[in-house]
Every structure is written in C-alpha cells, then in structure tokens.
Amino acid sequence: MKIKNYRPSKGFMWTLLIIILMAWIVPKCIPLTKKKQDSLIRSNIERQRLRLAQEFDIVKPEERARLPKFDSRKYALEKRNGRFWLIPRQYYGDTGFNINWPDTVNEILGKKWKNEFGYGTFFKISMYSPQYYYGDLNTFNHESCSAKTGRFKWNGILIRIYNAHFVYVTNEQYLDICLTALKILNEEIKEIKEIKELKEN
C-alpha cells in the first residue's frame, strides 16, 4: 500500500502566510497603553543609564597608563565618580566588595558572632557613581550606619549594603556589618591618583 505525500494547496499556503504576517504586523500597529509606554520608557532609560555608567566607570587604557604601579595580585582597580580606588582582592566583589558573615566582621571588629545562616553567607557592598544611579538619591542622605537603611554616602560615592542571601539580621548584627563596611572603606580601600595629579600636588 502506497502512502501518498500530502502537499498543501496554494490556498492553504497563502492563508497561512497572511496569518503569520498579521500576527507580526497588527501588534505593531496597535498603540501601546500608557502603562506599557511608561514601562518601555523606563526600560530604555535604564539601559541608557547602565551603558553610560559602564562608560563613565570603566578605566581606560590611557588612564591606567598614567596611574602609579600597584600589585594587581593584591588589589583590584575600580573607578567611581571620576576617582580611582584600589580594593583588596580578599574583599573584592561585583560592584564593590563583599563582607563574609561572620568571618569578616569577627576579624575586623574582633567580635565573636556565630554563623547561624550557613556557609557562604555574605553581604554585598555596592559602590555607585551618583551621576548614573537610577533611583532616588535622597535615600542615601543618611549618616553612616545610623539607620537600618543600608545606604549612605562616602567620599562622594553611593554605598549600598545588600543582603545577598535575604537572611534576617538583628539591629546589632546589621550595625556590625555596616561598621565593618565603613572600616574597610576608610582603612583598606585606597584612593590612587594619576601621576600627573601627584606631581601637581
């Protein structure tokens, strides 16, 4: 018994093609609702902000060439708010540095916190250039570690403490995490200036 190969008719093919074209064209012709327009605008602004922030904070080759030599095995170089910073690699993390709980806190503050959250718990300390931060800058207008907001300003840079594992911490634990971040910022992270600036100063 032979099985005939089915060949769709030309009418069927044209109908299918029209349906595909309509599915592609019609949504483009229907005006977006105000909510969708606002969402699209915000999305475009955010993408533009991220692109500008990356360009603004990237260390260009000509800038790196003007900086004093440093041990790249010990320090990571970051640029924030037009200034250059050396972050110890033992703390270095995405967008800034990390504080391992409770090891970093105990080591720096001499505390004896127990690790009730499990191995690998850490808090991200993000460092943002204010020019391209997408959000309310007023939320950073707090005295360092004065409130459990996790946001403050340091040397013109926006600092945000991010609970990476969403664990519950007491006010006392949060204060020690924040004080640890401040101590790393003030004592461990070093500003590095271009050689030209050093000569002028």
Image (cartoon, rainbow, N blue to C red):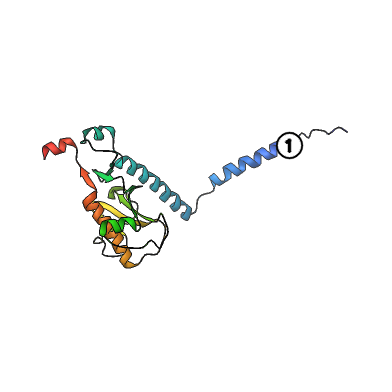
158 lies left or right of 11: left
Q: Residue furthest right?
A: 1
Pick the front one: 193 or 32? 193
- Residue 39 against residue 62 in the figure, above or below: below
Q: Residue at x 31, y 39 (%)?
A: 58
27 lies left or right of 152: right
Task: Estimate how packed mark 1 is, as few (under 14), some (14 to 19) or many (20 or more) residues with alpha carbons within 10 Å.
Answer: few
Pick the front one: 191 or 8? 191
Pick the front one: 108 or 77? 108
Rendering coords of residue 83 (x, y %): 23, 43
- Residue 77 against residue 117 in the figure, above or below: above
Rendering coords of residue 28 (x, y %): 54, 44
Rendering coords of residue 92 (x, y %): 32, 47
Tell me the quarter of the image containing the N terminus.
top right
* Tag 1 residue: 11
Q: Is residue 155 visible?
A: no
Task: Determine whether the residue tagged by mark 1 lies in a helix, strand or loop.
Answer: helix
Q: Is residue 134 visible?
A: yes
Total labels drawn = 1
Q: Residue at x 19, y 37 (%)?
A: 194
Badge 1 amino acid:
Gly
Q: Residue furthest bottom?
A: 171
Q: Quadrant of residue 3?
A: top right
Q: Residue at x 28, y 48 (%)?
A: 131
